[in-house]
Image (cartoon, rainbow, N blue to C red):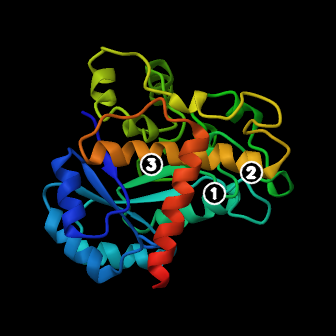
């Protein structure tokens, strides 16, 4: 069975569309964000999807987790997504993560999703941000297909709830090895769905052995000054945000029934993303 979660839901209409598109779960954000929802709004959305989809929340405080559980009841699945590490100096560390997991053990959580990184240090995208702030991941992590599986192994020793690891999984062999190793109970997939919503089903059926990995070619240059590893922050930002915008724009196309535009370049994607963000910000100011 393929379990699909669509995040950033803010209205019952969004939730209904996600379910119609085949989502197993809908995600709502309770932490500061332009997609943040209140408990009251989340209650309405949760009631709208009750019995048809699970609800996953992004939380900032334990009290919010408790409020959600109290609202939806004991028979409604509640999942929490947690950073394994921010990978930045002074940020949320792996030790902080383990302390939060120990607290979550007492909060009746049905699933804990493990990811990592921030916009300042986007390890989930496979790149490092500003070097002065960076905290290097473990060498064993850099050598593995899944970015955060090593961190999940330490979390497994603390957590009492099932775990899901998201970030970097692309091959059937890598996913099966992670499940056999016991460090995760579920595999989280994100970017491959942005261009091929049916890829997980085809992987499970044995039609393909590897999910789409377009990120490998999303850069101005593979190495040097124009690459994602450029010593100049401007080019690093264009590469990282351009690649991220590329995926956003593929989802926009799929949402209106258009095929993905795989040949769209990183610079074009960056400029379009910058324009979209400035346009939205201008509307908010009004």
Which residue is at the front of the view, 286 or 117? Answer: 286
Q: Residue at x 19, y 55 (%)?
A: 17
- Percent coordinates x, y for residue 33 in the rendering: 49, 72
Q: Quadrant of residue 95?
A: bottom right
Question: Which numbered mark, 1 or 3, is in the foreground of this view?
Answer: 3
Nearer to us: label 2 or label 3: 3
Image coordinates of residue 283 in percent, x first then y, are 44, 77
Measured as percent of width and height from the top left, residue 130 is found at: 79, 54
Residue denoted by label 2 = 129
Give neighbour class at mark 1: few <14, some 14-19, many 20+ (Cα, 10 Å). Answer: some
Name the residue: 27% across, 27% down.
Answer: 201
Give the residue pinned by disc 1: 118
Left or right: 243, with 42 as reference point: right
The location of residue 199, given as percent across then percent down, is 33, 28
Q: Quadrant of the N terminus?
A: top left
CA gap, disc 1 and disc 2: 9 Å
- View extreme (bottom): residue: 286
Question: Total number of numbered labels?
Answer: 3
Q: Nearer the viewer, residue 87 or 198?
A: 198
């Amino acid at each position: 069975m393929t379990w699909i979660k669509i995040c950033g839901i803010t209205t019952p209409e969004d939730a209904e569309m996600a379910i119609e598109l085949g989502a197993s779960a809908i995600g709502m954000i309770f932490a500061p964000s332009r997609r943040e929802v209140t408990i009251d709004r989340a209650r309405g959305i949760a009631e709208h999807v009750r019995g048809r989809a699970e609800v996953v929340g992004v939380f900032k405080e334990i009290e919010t987790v408790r409020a959600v559980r109290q609202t939806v009841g004991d028979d409604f699945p509640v999942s929490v997504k947690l950073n394994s590490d921010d990978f930045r100096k002074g940020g949320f560390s792996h030790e902080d993560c383990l302390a939060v997991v120990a607290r979550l053990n007492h909060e009746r959580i049905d699933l804990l999703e493990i990811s990592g990184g921030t916009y300042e240090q986007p390890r989930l995208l496979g790149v490092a941000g500003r070097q002065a702030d960076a905290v290097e991941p473990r060498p064993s992590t850099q050598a593995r297909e899944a970015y955060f599986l090593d961190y999940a192994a330490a979390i497994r020793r603390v957590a009492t709830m099932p775990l899901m690891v998201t970030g970097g999984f692309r091959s059937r062999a890598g996913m099966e090895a992670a499940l056999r190793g016991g460090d995760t109970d579920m595999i989280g997939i994100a970017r491959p769905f942005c261009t091929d919503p049916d890829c997980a089903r085809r992987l499970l059926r044995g039609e393909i052995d590897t999910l789409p990995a377009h990120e490998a070619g999303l850069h101005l240059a593979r190495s040097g000054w124009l690459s994602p590893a450029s010593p100049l922050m401007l080019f690093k930002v264009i590469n990282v945000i351009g690649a991220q915008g590329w995926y956003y724009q593929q989802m926009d196309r799929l949402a209106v029934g258009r095929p993905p535009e795989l040949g769209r370049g990183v610079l074009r994607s960056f400029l379009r993303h910058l324009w979209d963000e400035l346009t939205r910000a201008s509307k908010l100011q009004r």
